[in-house]
Image: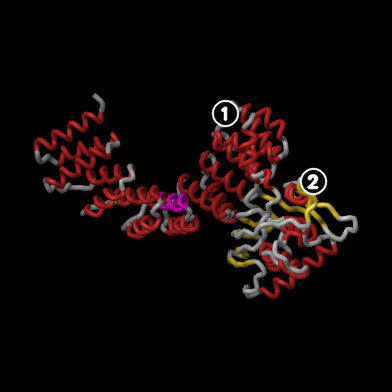
Amino acid sequence: MNSKLKLRQAIDTLYTNGPASHECYTRLALECFRASDVDQAKRLKSHMDLHLFKPKDTFIHNRLLNLYAKSGEISHARKLFDEMTQRDNFSWNAMLSLYAKSGLVEDLRVIFDNIPSRDSVSYNTVISGFAGNGRAGQALGVFLRMQKEGLKPTEYTHVSVLNACTQLLDLRRGKQIHGRIIICNLGGNVFVCNALTDLYARCGEIDQARKLFDRMVIRNVVTWNLMISGYLKNRQPEKCIDLFHEMQVSNLKPDQVTVSSVLGAYIQGGYIDEARKVFGEAVHGKAFLMGVNDDLLVSSALVDIWIEIDNEVHKFVADDRTHPDAKIIHVQLNRLIRKLKEAGFSPNTNLVLHDFGEDEKLESINYHSEKLALAYGLIKKPYGVTPIRIIKNIRTCADCHMFMKFVSNIARRPVILRDSNRFHHFVEGKCSCKDYWDNAFTQGYSKKADGTRLNVLIDGKECEELKVGFYSSNFYVRS
């Protein structure tokens, strides 16, 4: 007879015999908890209510509450919690766990704020809950609160906090936490190392991610996947494929995530024939999902943007005139554009959708918000050597891509741009994408015989103008 059947029969007997002792209820509550049998737990609770039984301590209710929380029984957990005349940290933490897993972040915050005495479990649960439910900023706030209260972060804490930094692409704070991890000698934990590798890879520090990867004594499939996908995101398909071969030699079996990233690398690098040999017909579907046949659909830069300078956040939109330093920013940008033109840069007004005159087109394309933000970053940090980081949730337009290349060369300042498809590392006039973006967009252009304008060749036919769509987006800049 299995344990659940025996448990059900024991509860049946309970209802037959009437009131039970504290010891009997304790034993049955523990059996329900160990068997993860929430249905019998509800029956047990109903029997206690029926006979007006009040436990002498928190043990029975805590076991039932924890089982409700693990099973996602929100209403039953809330009712029991509200009825409890005695609560301890186990009770409060069970509710925190329930709300964190259920994505009820507001309830999570309320419960956390009302706990009489918080412990490490309380903090870890809330930090993980916020980070796992898109509240990365709040997760970091709770982490700071944890430190102020003198509680020591664990490996679990650091993993959750690093995940929050990764969501925010907050490399500066991530590096600070990395320093704490080294001081606390937690660098040997595979989950911590995985979180660090992911942070650096997603923030464009792919070489630092690889250093961490190479130092790891223990690697699991997640470790390899993070590094392999990191190379893909940072537009280094050859290294992605090479690392995949290393993974195969290590006798670690790739999973679907590995295959998806490596297949993407073959396509990204243009190795379609090799990809077919390795993956067969899966290539076509992956190419479709990656939008390989959609490279000429370009978005403009009518966007919102935030730039962080010395821990202060500034917001811009396209052709922004509302910033307190707008006048200085536009002067700097105009000066920068003049310098770039002297070096051979020419704004691509063919990308402007609207039927404007040439002057209006120049005005529109010259003041895309990433250009304004980049100009502001150069004003505030004119002699910096660290890269200016731009994070954008749609593809960057071809003109801004070319602009960034010129700036990285003329201003001798690296720029790291992350758009929806990949990272672009601009250094001394070159981009890590090897001009894949510019080539993909402009490969159909040809000059007329008189050299006065650029036309587009689509399917061998000459077109007067290429129309492109406008999309809204958000992106961030850090310098």
Q: Which residue is mark 2?
A: 460
Cα separation between marks 1 and 2: 48 Å
Q: Mark 2 is on which residue type?
A: Gly
| Residue 253 horizontal/vertical position (percent) | 56, 28
x and y, in percent, of residue 370 in the image: 67, 62
Q: Amino acid at mark 1?
A: Leu
Decide if residue 109 is on the left or right side of residue 393: left
- Of callouts 1 and 2, the N-terminal one: 1
Horizontally, residue 29 falls left or right of residue 115, namely: left
Quadrant of the drawing holding the C terminus: bottom right
Q: Is residue 130 left or right of residue 276?
A: left
Q: Secondary structure at mark 1?
A: loop
Q: Is residue 127 magenta?
A: yes
The boundaries of the magenta stretch are 125-133
Q: Position of residue 162 (x, y in %)?
A: 52, 49
Which residue is depicted at the point 12% across and 48% down?
Answer: 52
Q: Residue furthest top?
A: 1
